[in-house]
Amino acid sequence: MGTIDDIQFDTNYSHPTFRFLLLNNSHSNEAGPSPVIVLTYTSLLTFIDVDDDLVRCQNYINDNKQKIITLVISDKKMIEWQNNINVIDDNIRKVYIFCNLYSDFLKMKGWNGCYRTQIQDVYLPDTLEYNLLRLGVDYIYQIKPEFKQEPGLYRNICRHARELLSALDNYYQDEIDNLDDSDSVENL
Amino acid sequence: MTEFASAVLETLCSLASKFILIINDESTIDFAQWSKQSVTIFTTAHCVSSLENLPKNFEIFLLDIDNTNIEQARFTTIDELIGRLADDVIEKYRLETNEIDGLFKTEIRNKQINQIYGELRQIHEKYITKKSPIQTSDSIAPILIWLISNKQPDKEDTNYIEKTFGKHFSSFPICFNEIEYQKFTSDIFVIIYDHCSESISSSIRQSSNVKHVYYYDESKKDDDHGIIRNRDDLCYRLASDLMDYYGKLGEQYRTNKQTKKAREMFSKAQELCQFLFHFFSK
């Protein structure tokens, strides 16, 4: 069990053209309850480069135009981004927003600010990890050709994808096992 | 109240009745009885003026369309206020979870919280985005359409796709224009084969039953990232998107307590998940 802060980035994933970034809330200036999103598979989410510094993240994306970015971002950071926007980076291709609160989810579903056409989905806390695992498999499939020249690394990322798939397989199995037939309206 | 707000309120009341008390006549209530608990009041600007001498531990959220009151946390639409109420209820569940010892109880609480999230997501889809993915008919498999302008798709491709995904799509029709695909009312995945005009592809994306659109063209050069250039990549995308599609359906049936259908959907998602392994075998 862990949180987004426990994700350790594997620097091998900084080399490909495609990058997977996550911009999280900064906790230092934030009072109140601890983050509600609990992750089970932090040790598998090593393809995600997590940051909580908006300006550093923006600079990286802007300085590395050749990199194509998938950005997972918290609702608060999305608003912060909108308020501190200098340029629209066209190398940000896909944006996924995650929210701790339903009221923020409603706000983000109607988001009319920057990158609105890049937004693929908005997540509530219960589905973030499932979607990160799934996006991770897609991400590794996408970058795989770039590792063809390095058999060792190529084998490693393929193994990593299989581990992510195993986690998804377990996830679906848990969903099946947890279904409660006595609860079903189909028996009525 | 909006349809959305009353649906959320109704759901919260049925799932978490112990946390919610609806008061229609504030004069009959003695608020002092809760002076030791944490209480949050959701009300309108009009009502709050008649509430006096509330205990200090009360937190108040106001629906105040005219922005007249500046002291309390205010919301200008009922949907926002109700959204905040939902968060408060979930937070109460979570605090309760932390207080109760024992992993088993924590698991039950988490299941209840996830049930609330699931229902809230569905209500949003039903009333705000108006995209309700649950189909009423019994045939629930989506359709895979090949949309072509003049060139027929490669027979080897179509046969291979049909053989691989025969269980997951109900049919694989070929269409020449958007009028033909508009007659299908179930969920649709579309492969745009060779190049179609921009106007067609943007109109496709607007149809609510179109779930995924792929551009498939083996002759295209490397520089366009949106285009799928080989059959393997096409199969990967279809399998991955189908897995998520069935996973979402499973979640929706689970939320609606249609256990049998939920199990069927999760099993299909799991099957596709296992199919994806071979893309990473060597």
Image (cartoon, rainbow, N blue to C red):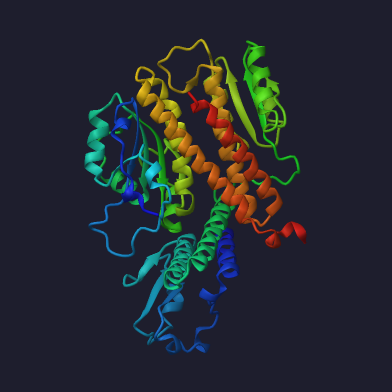
Q: Looking at the picture, does residue A81 appear above or below residue A64? A: below
Say if B118 sits above or below B202 in the image.
below
> x and y percent of residue B209 in the render?
63, 37
The quadrant in which residue B158 appears is top right
> Does residue B131 appear in the picture of this structure?
no
A30 left or right of A167 in image: left
Quadrant for the N terminus of chain A, please. Answer: bottom left
The structure residue drawn at horizontal position 39% and vertical position 74%, both measured from the top left corner, is: B60
Relative height, residue B254 to residue B22 (above, below):
above
Measuring 53% from the left and 15% from the top, which residue is drawn there? B217
Q: Position of residue A16 (x, y in %)?
A: 33, 26
Q: Nearer the viewer, residue B37 or A2?
A: A2
Q: Nearer the viewer, residue B207 or B217?
A: B217
- How many marks the image carries: the answer is 0
* Location of residue B274 by image quarter: top right
Q: Nearer the viewer, residue B222 or A120?
A: B222
Q: Can you say whether B205 is above or below B61 in the image?
A: above
Determine which quarter of the picture holds residue B118.
Answer: bottom right
Q: Could you tell me if residue B11 is visible in this image?
A: yes
Tell whether A3 sits left or right of B251.
left
Q: Quadrant of the C terminus of chain A?
A: bottom right
- Taking depth in this image into account, of B135 and B267 the one nearest to the observer is B267
Where is residue A91 shown, x and y percent of the image? 33, 28
User: Residue A32 placed where, x, y %?
Assistant: 31, 65
